[in-house]
Amino acid sequence: MKLIAILIALAVEHFSSFLSQWRRLEWMAACGSGLYRRLEGFGWRGGVLGVIVVVGALPLATFFIVLLLESLGWVLAFLFGLAVLIYCLGPGDLVDEVEGYIAATERGDREAAHEYAIQILGDEAPRDPVALAEEMKGVMFLRLNERFLGVLFWFLVLGPLGAVLYRTSTLLQDHAAELDEEFNANLARLRWILDWPCARLNMLAFALAGSFVDTMSCCAGLDDFLRKDNDVLIMDAAHGAMKYELAATEAPEGSPDVEGVAIALALARRSFLTWIGVIAFLTIAGWVV
């Protein structure tokens, strides 16, 4: 049923352009921040226990709702899980944002290109068009993982609870200024744990969707594969997968590498389809067994 929910959610995400208009996730971060403030005075607030309580509140509530709905009928539980998954994806359409950046850059509209890039890179997006294009070619894959693949993976593992857990952890990191240093450090460790399997699966998807040898060579060995920083692994693996395609293109000196961004977007699409294929295979294999 999880595979069916994922396929329906992706279809709705693809064909419903209005989703980004009603999908508001700020309340999830506000709930976490509010609970964090209520714990003021407790010595364990910034530690591992504090992170478990603050991040785990919404996933735990989701778990109990699923249990309640399952007691009333599996259809209600399925529909609730589907709604949760659709809601936790995104926010924003990565493909539309990247394509908007490419179109604006090609027509020479630097301001519009920068506005599209901010949606992907954040407020730290560089003003220099050349540097901006280089940033886009790497960070695009981090946003793909953060907005979609991480949510799908943890939904597959833990159901609606997993989707809410992953999304809550990412949203709270965006509100780091409201949290103390110890809490942020422990929250970063939780994100590292949640992203660890996703980063490795991303690497394998890039290898299948691009240059296999160059993708796998981004790790010096098994120890490097296991310990390498998740974000660095994703970007290094993506650039390895695109190595020959990028080498075949060369932007004029001083011009943004728009074609390179388009190549990166094509790899992102292929790797995403690879993910879905692997999920389908594992699910069907599970049914067979």
Image: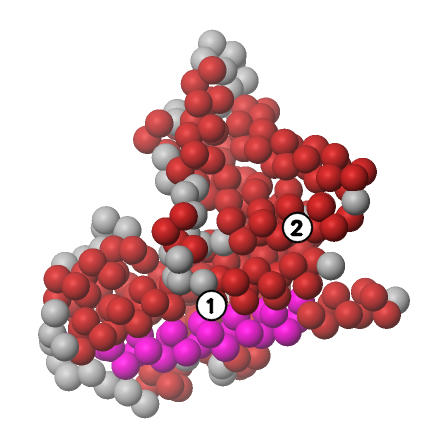
Q: Quadrant of residue 112?
A: bottom left
State left or right for residue 243 relative to residue 197. Answer: left
Looking at the picture, how far across and down is residue 22, in whole percent?
40, 48
- Label 1 Cα crowd, 10 Å radius (few <14 / some 14-19 / many 20+): few
Residue under label 2, please give it. Answer: 79
Residue at the location (47% across, 9% down)? 41
Seen at 52% across and 70% down, the residue is 272
Position in image of residue 288 (x %, y %): 86, 70
The residue carrying mark 1 is: 15
Q: Amino acid at mark 1?
A: Phe
Residue stretch rendered in magenta on the structure: 255-279
Amino acid on which the number 2 mark rests in the picture: Leu
Residue 287: image location, x then y, percent: 83, 66
Residue 114 versus residue 61 in the image, above or below:
below
Work out whether residue 197 can be spotted.
no
Direction from residue 226 to residue 249 in the image, left or right: left
Q: Give the side of residue 238 with respect to residue 81, left or right.
A: left
**Relative to 16, residue 246 above or below:** below
Q: Residue at x 36, y 61 (%)?
A: 139
